[in-house]
């Protein structure tokens, strides 16, 4: 088979279109190439424009971080050095302490200046240091480096302390630790309290040569608080008797203020034994104690030996009146008693108070250079206290006595019978009290016999219109738990409102009185609920906190 190839004629239009398409493709490629080349150049230009600032900013961040690291190290060293050198108990020279801190931190070359200012009560140390951090990448911006000046300063001041310590001397303090009832034991709670309180007195004293003072008022308490004759003489007090020296605060308002007014008449507690059944007064049942060497307040003392001697002399007897102890404790911290301290310091035998008086103590409550503390320790709840009601406190009584004997006659108007004198010893009514019989005043009656004996053996026999209890309650006002607890809360709150820091200790309370003592404290952490031997640690802990707060930096 013969194949014949036929060549078709070329289409001039097709060839022309093909040529045009190729030309267009070549033109587009050239344009893209040119754009690509030009874009690369632009990016390089942009990179060149932004690179230097970026490097500067990165360098700035790095240098600032390095500078801050060095500043923190300098600041920490300066602060630590100034704090340590400002310590008033520091035995080395402040400059030497600062130099040592910087040397150990490898910054000796960075220390520039140490300034020390000492006053009577404080020390201030200022430390100046600096460093120079060379520039790295920020040199591109023309910076040579960074100056790092640092100043550290510390002041430690030793503030004066005013402390009032109220210690329970009630009868239950004679019981054994861990016991909820008597009888007396050896060692007793009091035996454990005494060394703990003595150690506390020593612990809060300023160290020799150091600034700051510690003034302590000691308030032993039981049924009442014996203010003491010399201290009470600086108040305006009723004068029914002068046998003992207690005050009865009857008004609720008395417990809403820490002050005890010096120009307002105070009610002297009647000297009486409310509960003994014999004819003679029992010293341990007398409401206001007369053994001043054991029970009187020790006011504003700076002598730890005087305070410790009174603590060692304490003996347990009587009931528990926390509200009275807190009232007098708060009063010893109140600036309204400044004139009392001043006057007492001029009394023979009290010349040692010239120091506190000369400093203007008690200080104002807002004095930044002083701290005030009230410490109340008890082994149980408020129980009861007693006083004679006004009709039986003063003036002549209906009782007559033949001097030097126990022959008594009681007068009662028996409606015209004429026989108005009841002769106690013979149990009969007479026209007269007896030859030579002398009418007794009410204070003389209560100084002569217990109220119980007077009621049971005399009044109830002469006046049968009432029971013995009825007669007793007409004569004696008895305050018990709830009344006393409310007033404890009020006086503690008054102290706290005046920025007095209140610590309380419950020793072997077994829940009795815990709520009252906890409420009295400045915070739950300031109430110590302890058993037996723990009383020493409670006082030690309080002393540590006081000493820590005494120093301010």
Image (spheres, helix red, strand yellow):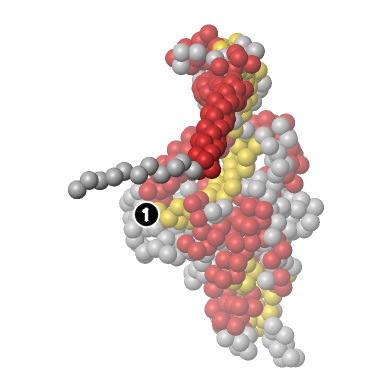
How many numbered circles does the render carry?
1
Residue 190: percent from the left, percent from the top?
A: 41, 50
Residue 81: percent from the left, percent from the top?
A: 53, 20
Give neighbour class at mark 1: few <14, some 14-19, many 20+ (Cα, 10 Å).
Answer: some
* Residue toward you, 262 or 270: 262
* Residue toward you, 345 or 126: 126
Q: Would you say 259 lies left or right of 424 here?
A: right
Residue under the point 75% across and 39% down: 343
Residue under the point 61% across and 78% down: 473
Task: Give SS at disc 1.
Answer: loop
* Residue toward you, 371 or 408: 371
Residue under the point 64% across and 75% down: 475
Answer above or below: position of 206 versus 408.
Answer: above
Answer above or below: position of 416 versus 73.
Answer: below
Most distant residue in the front direction: 2
Q: Label 1: which residue?
A: 531
Residue 269: percent from the left, percent from the top?
A: 65, 61
Most distant residue in the left direction: 1
Residue 351: percent from the left, percent from the top?
A: 67, 31
* Residue toward you, 231 or 189: 189
Residue 348 shows in the view: no
Answer above or below: position of 472 versus 279.
Answer: below
Residue under the point 62% across and 43% down: 372
Q: Which quarter of the picture shows residue 553?
A: top right
């Amino acid at each position: 088979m013969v194949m014949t190839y036929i060549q078709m004629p070329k289409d001039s239009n097709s060839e022309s279109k093909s040529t045009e398409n190729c030309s267009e493709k070549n033109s587009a490629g050239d344009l893209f190439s040119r754009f690509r080349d030009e874009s690369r150049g632009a990016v390089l230009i942009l990179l060149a424009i932004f690179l230097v600032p970026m490097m500067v900013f990165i360098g700035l961040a790095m240098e600032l971080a390095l500078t801050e690291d060095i500043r923190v190290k300098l600041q920490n060293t300066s602060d630590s050095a100034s704090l340590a050198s400002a310590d008033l108990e520091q035995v080395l020279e402040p400059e030497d302490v600062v130099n040592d801190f910087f040397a150990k931190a490898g910054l000796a070359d960075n220390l520039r200046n140490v300034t020390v200012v000492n006053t009577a009560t404080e020390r201030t140390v200022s430390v100046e240091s600096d460093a120079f951090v060379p520039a790295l990448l920020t040199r591109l911006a023309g910076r040579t480096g960074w100056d790092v000046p640092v100043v550290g300063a510390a002041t430690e001041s030793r503030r004066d302390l005013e402390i009032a310590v109220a210690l329970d001397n009630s009868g239950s303090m004679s019981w054994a630790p861990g016991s909820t009832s008597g009888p007396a034991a050896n060692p007793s709670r009091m035996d454990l309290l005494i060394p703990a309180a003595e150690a506390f007195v020593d612990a809060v004293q300023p160290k020799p040569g150091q600034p700051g003072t510690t003034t302590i008022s000691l308030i032993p308490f039981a049924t009442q608080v014996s203010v003491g004759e010399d201290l009470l003489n600086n108040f305006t007090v009723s004068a029914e008797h002068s046998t003992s020296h207690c005050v009865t605060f009857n008004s609720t308002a008395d417990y809403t203020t820490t002050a005890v007014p010096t120009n307002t008449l105070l009610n002297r507690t009647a000297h009486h034994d409310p509960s003994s059944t014999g004819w003679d007064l029992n010293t341990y049942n007398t409401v206001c104690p007369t053994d001043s060497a054991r029970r009187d307040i020790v006011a504003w003392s700076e002598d730890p030996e005087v305070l410790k001697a009174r603590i060692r002399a304490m003996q347990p007897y009587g009931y528990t009146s926390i509200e009275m102890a807190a009232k007098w404790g708060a009063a010893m911290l109140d600036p309204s008693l400044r004139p009392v301290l001043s006057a007492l310091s001029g009394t023979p035998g009290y010349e040692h108070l010239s120091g506190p008086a000369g400093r203007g103590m008690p200080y104002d409550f807002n004095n930044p250079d002083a701290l005030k503390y009230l410490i109340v320790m008890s082994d149980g709840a408020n129980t009861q206290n007693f006083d004679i009601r006004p009709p039986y406190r003063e003036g002549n009584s209906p009782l007559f006595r033949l001097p030097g004997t126990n022959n008594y006659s009681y007068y009662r108007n028996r409606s015209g019978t004429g026989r108005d004198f009841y002769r106690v010893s013979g149990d009969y009514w007479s026209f007269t009290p007896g030859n030579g019989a002398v009418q007794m005043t009410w204070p003389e009656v209560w100084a002569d016999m217990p109220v119980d004996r007077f009621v049971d053996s005399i009044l109830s026999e002469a006046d049968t219109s009432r029971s013995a209890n009825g007669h007793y309650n007409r004569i004696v006002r008895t305050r018990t738990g709830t009344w006393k607890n409310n007033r404890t809360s009020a006086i503690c709150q008054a102290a706290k409102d005046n920025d007095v820091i209140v610590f309380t200790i419950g020793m072997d309370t077994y829940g009795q009185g815990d709520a009252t003592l906890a409420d009295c404290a400045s915070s739950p952490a300031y109430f110590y609920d302890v058993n037996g031997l723990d009383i020493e640690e409670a006082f030690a802990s309080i002393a540590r906190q006081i000493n820590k707060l005494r120093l301010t930096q």
